[in-house]
Amino acid sequence: MSQLLSPSVSLKTNPLLGQWLRFESNGTVTVFTGKAELGQGILHALKLIAAHELGLPVSKVQTEAANTKHSPDEGMTSGSLSVQDSGLAIRQACAHAAKLLKANACQTYAELHAHIDPLLPIDVTVPAKSTAMNLTDGRDDLEALVQGEPIFLHDLGIKNNWGQSNINLLHGRMVRGPGLRCKLQVDGWLDALEALPEGAQAFRDGSLVAVLAGTEALAEKAASKLQRLLKWDVESLPVCREGGVDLFELAPAMDSQVFHEAGQLPEASQDAGQAKVYEAVYFRPALHHGSMGPSVALAVWESDQANSGLKVWSHTQGIFPLRKDLALAFGVDAQQIEVQHVRGAGCYGHNGADDVAYDAAWLARHVPGQCVRVQWSREEEMQQSPLSPAMRVKLQATVKLSTDAKQKNQVTESSGIELLSWQHDVWSQGHSSRPGRAATPVLKDSWQTEKNFPVLEPINVAAAAGAGAERNAVPPYLSTHVKVNAHRLLGLPFRTSAMRGLGAHANVFACESFMDEIAHDQGLDPVAFRLSKLEDPRAIAVIKTLADQVNWLERRQSLSQKEGWGLGMAYARYKSKGAYCAVVAEVEVSHQVHVRNLWVVADIGEIIHADGAVSQLEGGAIQSTSWALKEQAHWDADNITSTHWDAYPILRFSEVPEIQVHLMPGNSQNAETLNSPLGAGEATQGPTTAAISNAVFHAVGVRVRQLPMTPDNLAKAALA
Amino acid sequence: MLQSHQLNVNGQVVTFKPGADSTALQTIRNQFGLTASRYGCGQEQCGACHVLIDGQSKPICQLPADALVDHSVVTLESAQNKDLPSTPFLKALQLSFSAEQAAQCGYCTSGLLISATALLMNASGTVSDLQIRAALDPHLCRCGSHNRVLKAVKKAALQCGLKIASSEVSE
């Protein structure tokens, strides 16, 4: 009856009990994790897992923020994997600890402390509790947030509540040239230094320039002075039409590969007359992370010796990968560096956190023993952080009316058409420039120095890790032949990297729009059509539950009578192996699209913290609505120009739809039917955008294949 | 009458070093150590830095500290001061935000609480959904906690004795 799960990746890498748990003398248990709190509430979810397994109240368990000195190395906090990786490792460690408590006849974990060796390997054969988790405690860190306590890295080094500024802290500001890619004309350097305000210092290595001062104001003043005086050579950016739709023709090189092929391409049959070929091209522009708090970091070197220690405080997604790249950039041993994670503003992928950590460490190296804080501006955050790449998707399918074609417009599993072939071509730059993986640093400002580190081309993560541009490119639907071609664009000047869902957003948008287009053309109900092409019972259950909840057929029928209103649906299983998620969107379309309601149904397997999962799905749906309706990075010949919130608008309070989230029951007293927990953070990104697009088509008969669905793109699609 | 380098913050008279900061936000954070007001954009476009100035919710990321002399400034840390007229509203909001789990990363939370406080303390009898949305519209939230925030503000409004008017009636 108890569950025995295969050891998580994190447990294989960090097999010792002491790497995960410490039994305190006051009876509490401290849980270590290598995963970072990014605003998603992961530390809380991990605490609930531990408390449940240890049989302790939640108040008796604490988690410790990740630090390279004491945390298990769990790589990145990404890909909706923290519960699977860290959570299952902690569950196993705690199951073992609970068994040891009994075996040693201890009353408390404080007593157990004396009986066990922290180097004891975790026994992976101890079954975890079979009872479902029923802890509903809310996130206790929210109390500190609503009280405005200084819990962000942005607040570190400032003495709280009427204290004085920490006089040892030096403030750094980077001095940026006028282009995304530019080189300093060094002959003007000495003259520019003359103009520095008193008390400020400036440093330069190659084209990397920054200033240090005792206050933020002085550092800002010095930086803007240098910014005005220094001259740079700027490399031109490819100027694109319509948000980058032709970027794909401008890429200097392309790496094309067959990512996936299955089944046999059917030979032209006798009844070829009944087959119909569909083709459509979809586009999603480059997007910004748009974290609310621009990136910040603190760093201090112990001394000016080659073997000096370096301590860095960062809101990175991966303390160990960052440490590795810092070591490469500074030519020191990774063991000399300690990276302490402190939370920043919400993080949805590879933003500027790692880069600014390098900036702070680089500046601090000039002033050993002094702690340097570097704060990026909003403009830097938008220009210097990696972009989520623009993506183009072309879909082609051949469908055949089967002889028993019938039962149109009903939620049924036997719609009458067959998919004979399905081809998905995706063009995109790579979706990862993350630290920790290359032989040279990915930290972009290190590329500006005289060390001449190569500028690295963004890569796509391996298929086993969920893929990058190809994520969710393989359709979930039955087709006789399926082929996915991936075309990685090379040599473009944009640094692109991972953002919430990677390629899944554009691929699901394309695939689910295309399914809707085929269903419409064939006169089929889009829900029934999907159900007829799915075999996975969990996928079918999610869609049927959603259709029931929104009263799909009736609501769609009645909205057809209401001018400008429409209902659309979309489905995806994230990464084809993660959470199942289906979304229905209700929209009202005038000259622009208003999303009025979203219904989300998700199967995330075992539910660890229901409210936390709902919050992640809800937040993902709102963010995806924002991407779908409003967001598009833009640039001119020199630099990225979407540098502030007027130039890069996101969804506001007056525009958010009502959202209802339903979780499929994942908890069961019967372990045999208990599905492993799956991350919820990225599941809604693709289906929400696609559902909105399908609803727009239902509302006004206009198929928007180019995101975002702005009034401009809507008007263009209407005229197409 | 305060001197030129004194401010009234959270009901206390405090002295600041003039000319040391480029904005009031820096003064409040770095000189007074009141870090609940946050730097988000520096362009009055995101709402993360809002404080109450004479009972109105305003951004302070472009305003010089001198501009606050002779005005009453209230930050999120003011909740400990029972004498401020904003405190009962702020406390009710803090409780309801916590109860509704109305935050993910929470970077925008302080600004939201400040604007919601201004709305509730300046309301006469009722607030509507549209009024709440309008009051919070200068604030950006990237995690998507909007609906929970709206729910939390309504809950706090009721607790403060206000009525929630239906949107149709209110505007």
Image (cartoon, coloured by chain):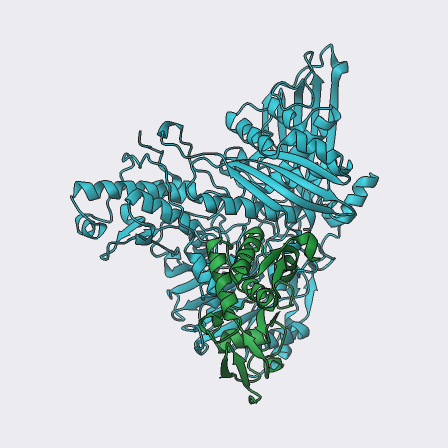
In the image as oriented, which residue stretches furthest toward the top? A270
- The picture quadrant where one finds residue A641 is bottom right
Q: Quadrant of the N terminus of chain A?
A: top left
In the image as oriented, which residue stretches furthest toward the right? A719
Q: Is residue A510 left or right of residue B24?
A: right
Spot occupied by residue A6 in the image (x, y as percentages of width and height)? 36, 33
Q: Is residue A634 above or below residue B58?
A: above
- Of residues A193 and A223, the one nearer the viewer is A223
Q: Colour of chain B?
A: green
Spot occupied by residue A397 in the image (x, y as percentages of width and height)? 69, 25
Q: Colour of chain A?
A: cyan
Q: Give the total of numbered labels.
A: 0
Q: Is residue A704 above or below residue A163?
A: above
Q: Quadrant of the C terminus of chain A?
A: top right
- Of residues A203 and B22, the one nearer the viewer is B22
Spot occupied by residue A613 in the image (x, y as percentages of width and height)? 48, 44
Residue A418: tell me if it is visible. yes
In the image as oriented, which residue stretches furthest toward the left? A105
Q: Is residue A28 above or below residue A694?
A: below
Q: Is residue A590 left or right of residue A661?
A: right
- Of residues A501 and A568, the one nearer the viewer is A568
Q: Residue at x 40, y 64 (%)?
A: A310
Spot occupied by residue A451 in the image (x, y as percentages of width and height)? 53, 61
Q: Is residue A62 left or right of residue A686?
A: left
- Of residues A154 and A244, the one nearer the viewer is A154
